[in-house]
Image (cartoon, helix red, strand yellow):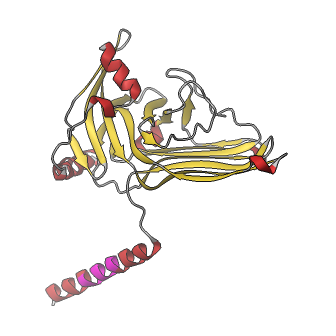
């Protein structure tokens, strides 16, 4: 019954979507350009849903093993404070110290299945970063896909709309979270990432998406009421080796309110609540 009410809410809220946007071949991720040219996938040129900095396009891929899979290709327009930063001190020579910060802009693309089978323990998404400028960091030194993040999350995270993963070298490599990164599509995942003597953390939010439990599968709905600002972040801290220090990058798809704005927002909510209470009292009088 709860899933039914969620369906009703998201159906009517989707009516708030703005006029459909379009896309061109050149703005698509290189991997998707390649499959279009090979005839193994198809993408609609007009979005089916738009809200904020998020647009959804119907997307299909074909493989001889599974046939056609119905998916969504989601376009996220990045906003500040999207950035990458380093605070790395060389253990042996200070001339190699790296204290740098770069704002990132452009678009991040996400492929997401319309339905995920709940008989599977992990559910895979792909983030494409090759339309982000300047080029994002390849924190884990993987040459296979430096500008793709092949991510799988467990069922609890899928239904919650977010996934996370962390390990801590100082705590005997304690591992938390069901999220995994994959070097290539279909592999078993690299829960320890290739990180040596360091801590790492990854956070992934399915911004604008809501998966609803339909018994044997989870079905995707668009969610224009989603007000989360951060789409993806990754962070690492190296304790030993040639460097010690941290690297991080975060991708935001909505503005993060300034502290003063948060205070004003809370004050406004308080005033609305007070007004509602007074109005209720007047009606009951």
Which quadrant is home to the C terminus?
bottom left
Tell me: residue 84, above or below residue 115: below
**Residue 120 location, x and y as percent?**
45, 26
Can you tell which quarter of the image residue 80 is in? bottom left
Tell which residue pokes out farthest to the top in this image.
Answer: 64
Can you tell which quarter of the image residue 183 is in? top right
In the rendered structure, which segment of residues is drawn in magenta? Answer: 268-275
Tell which residue pokes out farthest to the right in this image.
Answer: 92
Answer whether residue 212 is visible to the viewer in this image: no
Specify whether 97 is left or right of 234. Answer: right
Tell which residue pokes out farthest to the bottom in this image.
Answer: 285
**Residue 206 location, x and y as percent?**
40, 44
- Residue 98 is covered by the magenta coloring: no
How many tags in the picture? 0
Can you tell which quarter of the image residue 20 is in? top left
Answer whether residue 22 is visible to the viewer in this image: yes
Specify whether 201 is left or right of 231. Answer: right
**Residue 40 location, x and y as percent?**
32, 15
Residue appearing at x 50%, y 20% in the figure:
186
Residue appearing at x 23%, y 46% in the figure:
50
The main secondary structure of the magenta stretch is: helix
Residue appearing at x 41%, y 55% in the figure:
229
Specify whether 167 is left or right of 89. Answer: left
**Residue 191 location, x and y as percent?**
63, 33
Tell me: residue 216, above or below residue 226: above
Residue closer to the observer: 28 or 50: 28
- Residue 269 is covered by the magenta coloring: yes
Tell me: residue 84, above or below residue 195: below
């Amino acid at each position: 019954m709860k899933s039914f009410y969620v369906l009703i809410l998201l159906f009517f809220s989707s009516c708030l979507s703005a006029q459909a946007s379009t896309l061109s071949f050149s703005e698509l991720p290189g991997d998707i350009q390649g499959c279009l040219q090979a005839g193994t996938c198809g993408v609609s040129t007009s979005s089916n849903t738009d809200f904020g900095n998020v647009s959804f396009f119907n997307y299909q891929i074909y493989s001889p093993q599974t046939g056609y899979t119905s998916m969504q290709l989601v376009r996220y327009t990045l906003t500040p404070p999207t950035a990458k930063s380093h605070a790395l001190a060389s253990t042996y020579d200070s001339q190699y110290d790296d204290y740098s910060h770069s704002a990132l802009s452009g678009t991040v693309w996400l492929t997401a299945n319309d339905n995920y089978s709940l008989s599977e323990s992990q559910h895979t998404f792909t983030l494409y970063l090759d339309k982000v400028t300047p080029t994002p960091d390849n924190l884990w030194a993987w040459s296979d896909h430096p500008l793709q993040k092949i991510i799988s999350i467990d069922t609890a995270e899928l239904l919650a709309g977010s996934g996370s993963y962390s390990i801590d070298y100082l705590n005997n490599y304690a591992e938390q979270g069901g999220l995994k990164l994959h070097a290539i599509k279909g592999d078993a995942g690299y829960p320890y990432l290739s990180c040596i003597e360091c801590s790492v953390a990854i956070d992934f939010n399915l911004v604008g998406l809501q998966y609803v439990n339909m018994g044997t599968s989870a079905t995707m709905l668009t969610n224009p009421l989603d007000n989360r600002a951060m789409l993806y972040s990754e962070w690492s801290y190296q304790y030993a080796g040639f460097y010690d220090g941290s690297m991080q990058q975060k991708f935001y798809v909505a503005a993060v309110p300034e502290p003063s704005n948060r205070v004003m927002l809370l004050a406004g909510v308080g005033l609305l609540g007070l007004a509602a209470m007074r109005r209720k009292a007047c009606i009951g009088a």
